[in-house]
Image (cartoon, coloured by chain):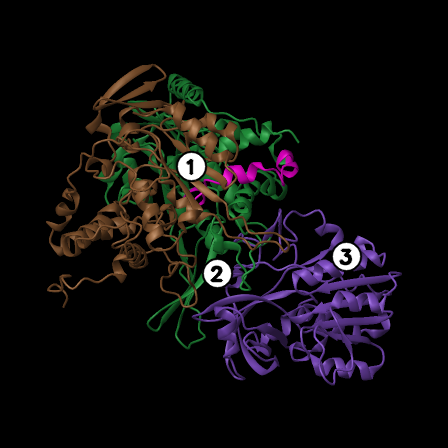
Amino acid sequence: MKDILNPYKPEIATVEDTWFETQGDRAIKTFKVVFDNEEKRESWEHRPGQCAMIGVLGVGESMISISSSPTEGKFLRFSVMRAGKVTQALHELEPGDKMTVRGPYGNSFPVDDWKGKKILTIGGGIGQAPLRPIVEYVKANRGDYEDLTTIYGSRTSGDLCFKSEFEAMRERGDVNVHLSIDIEEEGWPHYVGFVPSLLMEVNPSPENTIAVTCGPPVMINFVLQNLKKLNFADEQIYTTLENRMKCGFGKCGRCNVGNLYVCKDGPVFSYATLKEVPEAFA
Amino acid sequence: MDSKKLTKDKFGGFVELLSKQKLYVPQMVGETLRFAPVSSKDEVDLVFSNTVVPPKSVLFPQTETLYEYEAGGTELIMPEEPEEKVLLGVRPCDARALTIVDKLFSWDIDDPYYVNKRENTTIIGLACQEPGINCFCTSLGGGPASTEGIDLLLTDLGEGYLLQPLTEKGEKLCQDAGELLVEAAGEDRQAAESLHQEAAEKIVRKIEVDTIPQKLEELWESPLWKNISDACLGCGACTFLCPTCHCFDIQDEMEGFEGRRCRVWDSCMFEEYTLHTSGHNPRPTRRERTRNRVNHKYSYFVKNFGTIACVGCGRCIDNCPVNIDILDILSQVVKEAI
Amino acid sequence: MVDLEKLKNVAKETVSREDVKYLVGWRQGTYGFRVSPHFMTKPEDADKLIFSPLCVNNLATYLTLAEKLPVPRGEEPDTRKVALMVKGCDSRAVVQQLIEKGIERDSVYVIGCPCQGVLDLEKVEEKFPGVQSPVDVQWGDDKFIINLPDGTQEVPREELLAQKCLNCRYPNPVISDVMLWEEVEAWGNGEYADVKELEAMDSQERWTFWQEKFASCIRCYACRNACPMCYCEDCVLDRLNPQWVFRSNNISENTVFHLARAFHLAGRCIECGECERVCPMGLPLMSLNRKLAKEVREKYAFEPGLDPESKPFQSSYRPDDQEDFIL
């Protein structure tokens, strides 16, 4: 079979480094992977917000958002929550182990169109993974953007991903970092409460600002409501959708919301688009 | 190229010619009629009502290996190029359905498994003379002798077949058949035409589809969906047997030390189809699933490809165990006041 | 005898009761000899109700099929009953679900419809092919009265009776809150002629027979979903983690699917025949189920779905249970 054109055929990639972001039953583990094929390593291009189908031979594949920015180097990062059969198998992988990777899939955040604007990301839990490449991209092209504000929260401090990176960002001085946890904890110096409330506390101005939110559906719903209260227009608000996926390029059928496929028309949608799509918030 | 005629005493020779490629014809497999490879020319008999399983099963098999591998290995063993095939006796509705599935499988990115097989396959249609009681192809732009998706159309004239080559593949077949065929006479063509006409008149079920895509959008929250789906068993009979349904699952399967990543038919009527790993299901009940099935065919596909993804073959009606009837649903959609 | 007036009146009264959510009965289908389950929420819906030799569907499956969605915050769960019309065979499914505690007795209101045997859809569609408009069928003495668009036909009962009814011993509902009309006399002797045919084959023949059948299965799961006794919330055949059956469609996986289902139904199948009826590929699934039912009846003198107070087959033990066949 002419395999050059075969979009189902994955590349083999090697896990270069792994670490746990969070612990517990639904632990989140980050993988830094590089393609075995040198040509692929060089030619691979992705944009912030895109996903890849990563898998373990003999177990299966899962669509995971690429949590690294292309500006970081010739590698890919995935932060994976242990939830089902495939993610359990992925969690078994250690440096040197192989995984299958195909993609990148989907559209991306239009970060280049946002140049000259203020960027506000609002994340919850594992939802920070697709937002991280935006933050990294803006950091790498810092002069092209106005303020960069990151609001991020999780249930407890132990559930926060990319913790050390937030500390480093704070030290940089050119990123406004706002962290929160839902439940009071001893020694926690930051906000206690839900992310949508922290958003109101931060009270960002909608002027020349793009707001991007990603997290659990309930959080997204309240964040959207609050952004409206803060007078953000629908066109200024972006989010990502997720659905069960198998192919990644609009054939297998299962990820549709209305006539759109999350895998190819998404995962990134402006609220203006999403408002018109049936099942988008189902 | 002009029409040809194949007298029935030469039919055996024609089948033999077709058998040079892998030839599929409708045959009884177990208790049901479906397309299966021919092993000897004696099996070929075109007297049949339409197959229960549509011919999509040859080009988009229920189970298809994407690639194989060995336990612990990283080498992917790709399947071989598909062999050339001929499908003999495809009903015009099912051939039309292939043109609809083609759109999806060559959208943006070609699906090599489908597209390679499709390009390597010749479709020999058979004009329908006894439409089933639930056929409604004429409402969807098709007909008992429609030619879309067909390379060579056969019409059974009694003592022989009229052969209408419609594409290069069809013309080539006629050339290869050489002396087996004679030029069709004007009266043969007329006979075929009146048979086509008669067949079309036998189709009693009809629906006016023009307003449906728009109506469906307006009826998104209608109680209709609950009423229709109350009786639904949530099985996959309607979707698996639909000639245009094309959704699939991808699974890794290990047997001993040998593994394969394969795709298998899946159905949007199954609860598991949209179930997230978190346990959340964006289509939690049969109501949402039924609504999606009808919308996919009559609204979403229209938006994405400009055509309704239904050819009116009637299989979903014939095979629903609880008489959920797409025409009944559509006529309710048409009638429903917004 | 069937009294349609009474059926409709009882349905109207039942669906008006405060403790009833909805009623499930039968209505004429959209074409030919088909019927559809009819869900009634208000008295007017009773106009469409029918009870005739066409009412083959076992509606007991709907007791467990309805999705149990989380109750929205601040709302009370709806604990009202589901009213269900049942024939004799159907009622045994209700009883078996009660025995297994799949449902609670006060969650269901059973409307009993003594039944003289239903039509075999395949046979009647073969005898009267191409009938598009809906056909009314009635019971006559030892015959079916079939009101076709071009005139009435009478056909001897045996000729068109459904396989499951040929030898029926339970034509009258074994459980009911209201019985619609007089009970009919049972006609079956409980023999398993079809099973004996298969038993007469040698094992190689039988294996070939089933392999051919299972090869044509498309795994649409109509058999499982129609079965009133297949109501596990998490079916072993769907599970991916761990996965017991691959999704691949081949003889091996299909065989596992059907055998797993058959064994899960041993001592539970009430022989309503729905699995076989709904199979689009025409698999003789009841031969499997009836083989196991025969074994259970002969070896343990046990029949499922008769006494709601009894214990499930697998969890009951009698000191005189046979064990000489256990290796």
Tag 2: residue type? Answer: Lys
Report which residue position mark 2 lands on.
A2
Disc 3 is placed on an element classified as: helix
Quadrant location, the N terminus of chain B:
top left
Q: How crowded is mark 3: few (under 14 residues within 10 Å), some or many (20 or more)?
A: some
Disc 2/disc 1 C-alpha distance (Å): 26 Å
Residue C29 in magenta?
no
- Determine the colour of chain C: brown
Name which of mark 3 and mark 2 comes first in the sequence: 2
Quadrant location, the C terminus of chain B:
top right
What is the chain identity of the residue bearing mark 3?
A
Chain whose colour in the figure is purple? A
Q: Residues within 10 Å of mark 2 (few under 14, many from 20)?
A: few
Residue C272, image x, y percentages: 29, 42
Report which residue position mark 1 lands on.
B170
Q: In this view, does B298 lie above or below B61?
A: above
Looking at this view, is A192 or C197 the one in front? A192
Left or right of A261? Residue A60 is left
Residue at 34%, 18% in the rendered image: C148
Q: Do the residues labelled 3 and 2 touch (CB within 8 Å)?
A: no
Report which residue position mark 3 lands on.
A225
Chain whose colour in the figure is green? B
What is the chain identity of the residue bearing mark 2?
A
Tag 3: residue type? Answer: Gln
Callouts 3 and 2 in the same chain: yes
Q: Give the range drawn in magenta.
A: B214-239
